[in-house]
Amino acid sequence: MARYWWVNHKQTSREEIRGGYLWSPKLKRDGSSNLFYSNMRRAEPGDYVLSYAGTYIKYVGQVCDFAFSRIKPDEFGPAGDAWDNEGWMLPILWRPFGEGLHPKSHFNRIRDLLPAKYSPLSLTTGNGNQAVYLAEIDEQLFLTLLGIGQVSLDELFGPGSFAVYSGLQMELTDEEVQEKISRDIALSSTEKLRQINARRGQGAFRENVMRHEMSCRLTGISSPRLLIASHIKPWRSCADGFERLDGNNGLLLSPNVDLLFDKGLISFWNDGRVIVSAHIDSSDIVRLGLETAVSKEHAAFRDEQLPYLDYHRKNVFLV
């Protein structure tokens, strides 16, 4: 069942709408958690989001994929100076919200439908609450606003409309990082190629991983032709070339396991036990032939792998 969200993003709304995403830091500047940033990880494919900026709702979006780690978009410019560099990116398929809607003009009608706590609008004035970023709202409020704006979701979002869009932002992020590597005058052409090849699990990275990993941890497959060299800490999230090429930041996985791991649907504890996300149905685990594998004990990870594994559990795995 879909959830409904409201985002206040005046500073970066143009860039986020144009780019097809939402982006937030992971934590406050003091290192503490922020509910509105954590909501980025709670949003799921198929959820709907109202875009509020400049006192108007001008767009409605459908979440296309789960949020993933991504450095702050360059296009934010000075608007993002106050935020940490690493954050959550949530891919969104945006559509115009009719002619736009001024919620304050309909405040008497929607006030009682706003959340009593963490409301995106002030419950006394009807103005936007700029302390709020991504807030969950009730379905009734969402549908009431659609009615006022005479907006039809069926016309904007057909069945499976976001399917081809899913994962696009992740691919674009990889391409942006690759472009930065290509422009880095501090790197030799050989080093640039080594880092770029690592994006697809090839070249020096694959060789480095194979020094430590001999087979897929879940399926036991050991034929190199059937295994993917997969980053534990995603290539796009690596801090530097060392992390992108470090064999300790990799696993050899069969294709079905690699897909689950890359999408954060499984992860591992340090002792090798498998963690299965609540976002994948147990029946799909059975269909993939992994029911026994995810319940078995597997080899513990080496100390050098643990920082990367900790990153995966905190930033990739879908709780």
Image (spheres, rainbow, N blue to C red):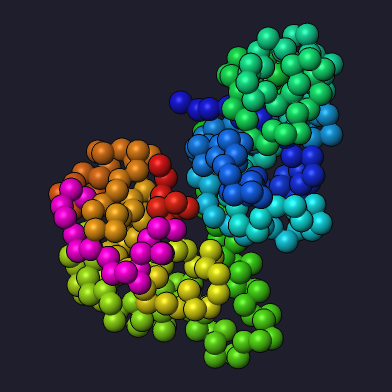
Which x, y percent locates residue 225? 27, 75
Along the line of sight, the residue nearer the viewer: 220 or 304: 304
Q: In this view, does 115 lie above or below 210?
A: above
Q: Is residue 305 on the magenta stretch?
A: yes
Please identify the quadrant where the C terminus is shown.
Answer: top left
Q: Is residue 127 visible?
A: yes
Q: Is residue 276 on the magenta stretch?
A: no
Q: Is residue 75 above or below residue 203?
A: above
Residue located 63% across and 16% down the image? 116
Q: In this view, does 271 lie above or below 157?
A: below
Residue located 41% across and 50% down the image? 317
Majority secondary structure in the magenta region: helix
Report the residue that reaches farthest toward the front.
30
Magenta range is 294-311
Which x, y percent locates residue 94? 67, 40
Quarter-wise, where is residue 277 in the image?
A: top left
